[in-house]
Each structure stands twice: as C-alpha cells, then as structure tokens.
C-alpha cells in the first residue's frame, strides 16, 4: 500500500521517453487551433502534420539509437523495446502516406481538411500509445483515442449514405468490441492484482483465480480479434472499408491493424508466457496459442475465398486485408511458441516487418484506387478498371506491381514478408502449426485468382465507355514513388531493414556502457 | 448475507451479459449504444470490486479512465447517429443496409 501511495505522490515523469508521441500530439493540437482561424486553407495543416510526423520519426530514431534508461519511466507504464519502436515506425509511415494520398480527395470534395488532419494525427497518437503502453490503462486509452478518431474519419463524408452507414457500423461494433476487451482487462486485473504487463507476466504463475485468468484471456482475444479483423470477428470490415472515404480506408487497413497487433502481441506474448510448474497459466498459454492458430487458419481461408467473390475493388481489398491479418497471425503464433527470448523477439520483428510490407503495398494500391475513384468513390467496381491498362500505363503498372506484392511474388516485399512470418511457425515443429503454415501456402495460391483478376481486367478487357486518364498530382506521385521503391527495397534489401528492427534500444545501451 | 467479492462479480457478469444480449437483440442504434454503456458499467463494477478486495487503487483509477472514455464515446456516437438520421430519418440499424455482399 505504501509503495502505491508513494508512486501516486511522486510519479516518475519522463517526457523524453514519449517524445515521438508528444510531438505528434502537439502537431495535432496546432492543426486544430490553426484550423479555427483559417478554415479555408488547403495545404498549411497538411504541411504542419507532415512536419510533425517527420520530427516524430527523427525523435524515434534518436531514442532508438541513443542510450537512455527508461526502465522506471512513468512508473513502468511505458515500454521501451523492439516491439514499440518497430511498430511505431510503421504507424508514422502509414500516417504520413495517408496525408499525401488524401490531398486528391480533399481537393475533389469539400472536406473539412483541418479537422481531418487533426483527427488523423490524434489517431496516430493513439496507435503509438498502443505500441508503447506497458500498462493496460495506457493500451486501453491508446485504443480508444485511435478508435474514436477513426469512427469520425469513416463518417467524414456527411451527406453520403455509404459513409454514414460505415461510421455507424464501425462505431457500434467497435465499442462493442472495446467492452469485451475491457472486461478481459478487468478479469486479468482481478486474477493478478496488477494492470502492468511486466508485473502480470511475473505474477501470472501464482494468480489468485485461475478461472478468471482463462475467462479474461478469452475476452481479450475477442476484443483484439475485432480490432485486427480476424475471422469470426471480421463481419464489420468489408462494409466499413467500402463505405469509408478511400484514403481513410487505406489508413484503417494499415495503421490500426498494426497498432492492434502491437498491443495484442504485448499482452499475449509478453504478458501470458509459459511459467514452469503453473498448470493454469500453461493451460492459458496453450489455449491461446491453439485458439489463435485456429483463428489464423479461418481468417486466411474466409478472407481469401470471400475476396474471390467481390466485384468492388475496395471490398476486395478489405477481404484481402482480412487475409493478410491471418498471415500476420501465423507469425504471432510463432512468437507465442518460441522457446527462447531471442526467437520470440525475432518472430515479433518478423510480424512488424510483415505489417510494414503490407502497409507499403496497401497504401500504394489505395493511392491508385483513390485517384481512379473520382468524386464520392463512384468508380470502384471491377468494371471501372476495364481496359485502362495502356491508357494509363503509370497507374496500371504500379497497381499491378502492388497486386503482385500482395500475392507474394519473389523480389517484391510481400514475398519476403510471408517467408519471415511463416518461418518461426514451421521451426516449432508442432503439428497444428505445421498445418497452419500449409493452409497459409494454399491460401496464397488461392489469392492469385483475385489479385491477377484485377491485372487481367486492366490490360485485357475492352473498355466500352469513354475514359480519359486522370492527371497524377505531385503528392500522389510522391506516394507512388515511395511505395514502389518500398516494394522493391523491402523485397531486395530486407536484411538491412530487419537489422534496424533487431537493434534493440536496451542492447544499444549495454554496448555503450 | 454479507455481500462479498463473488456477489459483485456475479452481478457484474449478469449486467455484462444483459448488455451483450441487448446489443445483439436491439435494432435501434441508441438502444444498442445504451446496452454498450451497460457493459462498460458492468466492467467498472468488476474493477471496483477487485480494487476493494485487494486494497489497491489501480482498479479505481481505471474506472475513472473508463468513465471519461465512455463520455467521449457518447458524444461521438450521438454525432454519428445524428448524421445518419439526417439522411435516413431513422436510427434503425436495419436501415443501414446499402453496403452488402
């Protein structure tokens, strides 16, 4: 009791440890204030947001390579490890690219641009706290900051029925899932008397109420499963992704998914480890590993098979994002069964790398879909892509490249990403996990159908209506250049990126000492 | 009978179940949202019960956070419902049916 009182009176405030988050939050606030005084502006808030995100990235790298002792920062509520820094990098990248992609949309339609940019930055802060929180309170607050901002972003096209419906469904199902997540947190707190992940991991072997531990784990699984869109908790995904404005969909498919994985990994892999001699805890570990393995298989099968049946490109990409969450879960399960902490960190890095490759490919693909979508995203059916291949060579060749990367063609980012996430699961040698990898490979083969279909439609179908190539604005060209370089760069030089991911902040500290 | 930890946990479990069933059963968006609030309050009860049981303030602090978030959720949720109502003159979720396979 006394230690708790002391902590409340004398908290360890260490702003340096959350500098990237603080920078993005300040940028978001600045954007909001600026928007009050100059509501008609077009580029200023975007520029402030981009500068904020770039500064936050610099701060992140400074933290990553510097020597700091953050062990007790915020009384252990903030983590400082590979998991945090690598996922934060993915989120900052997604956010910056989304701002560039949105320029097409904000110019075409009368979007309240300042509001949009501040919401996007606040969503980013929420995501970053989901990666950096080492306490369930922080994870929950980060998740809600992210979710509340994205609910509004999905419904930003106020007079469009699709957008309204998307926001309504996302809001109701999202808060429903949050309630489950929260109940899980309460039960875990009840079993271990702590909300800190490190303390939970330490106390879980001697938990007071083992039954509560299992119930809490199941509730958390449901809550996180909703957030990262895994089958059977995926029903909201296609509707929400189709109805939301395309740049927002691009953001939702890449950013919040990465953030959800970051929290999910932290709570389950780091918070619920195997404890020698503790039957209930090991039962919990065994059950979540098998539950996630089953969920991964279902997610891959349902996501890929349903994607085949779609006639709308945004909907197809929504199912594809479900399928990709399944592939990432394969790496997650691999991290769960890892015997040593090196193997575990390696698997976590593989998941982060996979989500980075997915984010790069996804943002590039959605950039093209945004440009071709025209006002209110009218042109997003497959037939709207008929025969545009040689009329708009830049757009169609880049889009084809992204489809091939989604599919996992060698030399592209998607291929290396898949190899890396499947690796740890195969190495474990457990039958269930081997079956899971086999399913993953078969599903990859199935996915060829719908990814290649888009390429076939673009290059080999006759276009019956009049169509002129849209002009590619400079911001979108930037996104396309960065993502194309990213697809090849991550595919060819993956070891360099991975070695950056592997550089653990604490290991650097040890070297310097 | 003196109320003990199990009583509170049982009550919060019942409240949470009522809320969850309500969300699935109700068709009115505002009714669904009220059921979600009921679920959140069931969670709060769990937190407070455990905080009291362990003599630990963390659970009570968590409840403050949940309440603050629930208030934000209400503000945003009602905003979304109103923008839907403006276009559809209804807050029935069955009317939200344009996006389908």
Image (spheres, coloured by chain):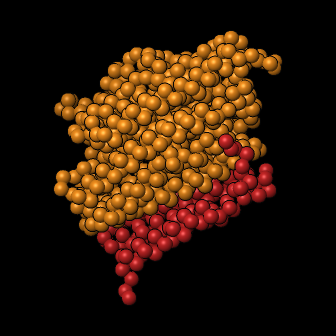
Which color is chain B depicted in? red
With A255 as the anchor, is A162 left or right in this view?
right
Nearest to the observer: residue B74 or residue A489? A489
Place residue A316 in its image quadrant: top right
Chain in orange? A
Nearest to the observer: residue A477 or residue A119? A477
Query: Can the viewer see residue A79 in this picture?
Result: no
Nearest to the observer: residue A202 or residue A513? A202
- Indicate the position of residue A306 as horizontal and vertical percent values: 58, 38
Of all residues shown, which one is farthest toward the bottom? B1
- Indicate the position of residue A115 as horizontal and vertical percent values: 65, 42
Q: Is residue A449 above or below residue B50?
A: above
Q: Is residue A462 above or below residue A115?
A: above
Residue at point 66%, 28% (across, down)? A370
With A489 as the anchor, is A384 left or right in this view?
right
- Indicate the position of residue A14 as horizontal and vertical percent values: 35, 46
Residue at point 24%, 50% (across, down)? A274
Query: Can the viewer see residue A136 in this picture?
Result: yes
């Amino acid at each position: 009791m006394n230690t708790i009182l002391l902590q409340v009176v004398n908290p360890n405030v260490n702003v340096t440890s959350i500098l990237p988050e603080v920078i993005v939050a300040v940028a978001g606030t600045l954007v909001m204030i600026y928007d009050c005084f100059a509501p008609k502006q077009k580029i200023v808030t975007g520029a402030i947001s981009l500068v904020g995100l770039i500064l936050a990235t610099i701060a992140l790298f400074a933290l990553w390579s510097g020597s700091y002792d953050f062990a007790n920062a915020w009384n252990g509520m903030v983590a400082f490890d590979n998991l945090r820094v690598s996922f934060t990098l993915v989120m900052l990248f997604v956010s910056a690219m989304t701002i560039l992609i949105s320029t097409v949309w904000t110019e075409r339609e009368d979007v309240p641009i300042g509001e949009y940019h501040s919401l996007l930055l606040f969503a980013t802060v929420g995501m970053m706290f989901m990666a950096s929180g080492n306490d369930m309170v922080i994870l929950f607050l980060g998740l809600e900051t992210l979710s509340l901002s994205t609910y509004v972003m999905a419904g930003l096209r106020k007079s469009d029925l699709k957008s309204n419906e998307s926001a309504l469904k996302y809001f109701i199902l999202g808060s429903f899932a949050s309630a489950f997540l929260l109940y899980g947190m309460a039960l875990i707190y009840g079993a271990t008397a702590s909300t800190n992940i490190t303390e939970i991991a330490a106390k879980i072997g001697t938990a007071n109420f083992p039954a509560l531990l299992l119930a809490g784990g199941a509730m958390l699984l449901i809550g996180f499963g909703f957030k990262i869109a895994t089958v059977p908790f995926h029903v909201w995904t296609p509707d929400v992704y189709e109805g939301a404005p395309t740049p927002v969909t691009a953001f939702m498919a890449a950013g919040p998914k990465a953030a959800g994985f970051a929290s999910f990994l932290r709570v389950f892999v780091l918070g619920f480890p195997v404890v020698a001699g503790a039957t209930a805890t090991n039962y919990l570990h065994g059950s979540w590993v098998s539950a996630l393995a089953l969920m991964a298989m279902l997610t891959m099968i349902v996501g890929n098979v349903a994607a085949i049946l779609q006639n709308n490109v945004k909907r197809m990409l929504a199912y594809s994002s479900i399928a990709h969450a399944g592939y990432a879960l394969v790496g997650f399960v691999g991290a769960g069964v890892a015997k040593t902490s090196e193997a575990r960190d390696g698997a976590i890095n593989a998941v982060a790398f996979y989500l980075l490759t997915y984010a790069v490919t996804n943002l590039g693909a959605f950039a093209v879909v945004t440009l071709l979508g025209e006002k209110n995203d009218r042109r997003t059916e497959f037939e709207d892509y008929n025969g545009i291949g040689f009329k708009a060579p830049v757009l169609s060749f880049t889009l084809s490249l992204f489809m091939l990367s989604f599919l996992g063609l060698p030399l592209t980012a998607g291929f290396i990403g898949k190899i890396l996430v499947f690796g740890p699961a195969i190495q474990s040698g457990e039958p269930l996990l081997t079956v899971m990898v086999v399913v993953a490979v078969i599903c990859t083969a199935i996915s060829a159908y719908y990814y290649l279909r888009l390429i076939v439609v673009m290059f080999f179908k006759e276009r019956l209506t009049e169509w002129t190539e849209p002009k590619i604005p400079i911001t979108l060209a930037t996104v396309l250049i960065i993502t194309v370089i990213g697809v090849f760069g991550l595919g060819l030089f993956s070891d360099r990126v991975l070695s950056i991911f592997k550089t653990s902040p604490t290991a650097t500290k040890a070297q310097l000492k | 009978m003196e109320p003990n930890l199990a009583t509170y946990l049982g009550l919060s479990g019942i409240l949470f179940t009522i809320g969850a069933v309500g969300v699935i059963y109700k068709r009115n968006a505002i009714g669904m949202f009220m059921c979600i609030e009921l679920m959140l309050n069931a969670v709060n009860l769990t937190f407070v019960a455990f905080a009291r049981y362990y003599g630990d303030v963390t659970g009570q602090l968590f409840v403050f956070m949940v309440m603050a978030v629930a208030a934000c959720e209400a503000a945003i949720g009602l905003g979304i419902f109103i923008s839907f109502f403006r276009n559809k003159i209804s807050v029935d979720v069955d009317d939200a049916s344009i996006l389908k396979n």
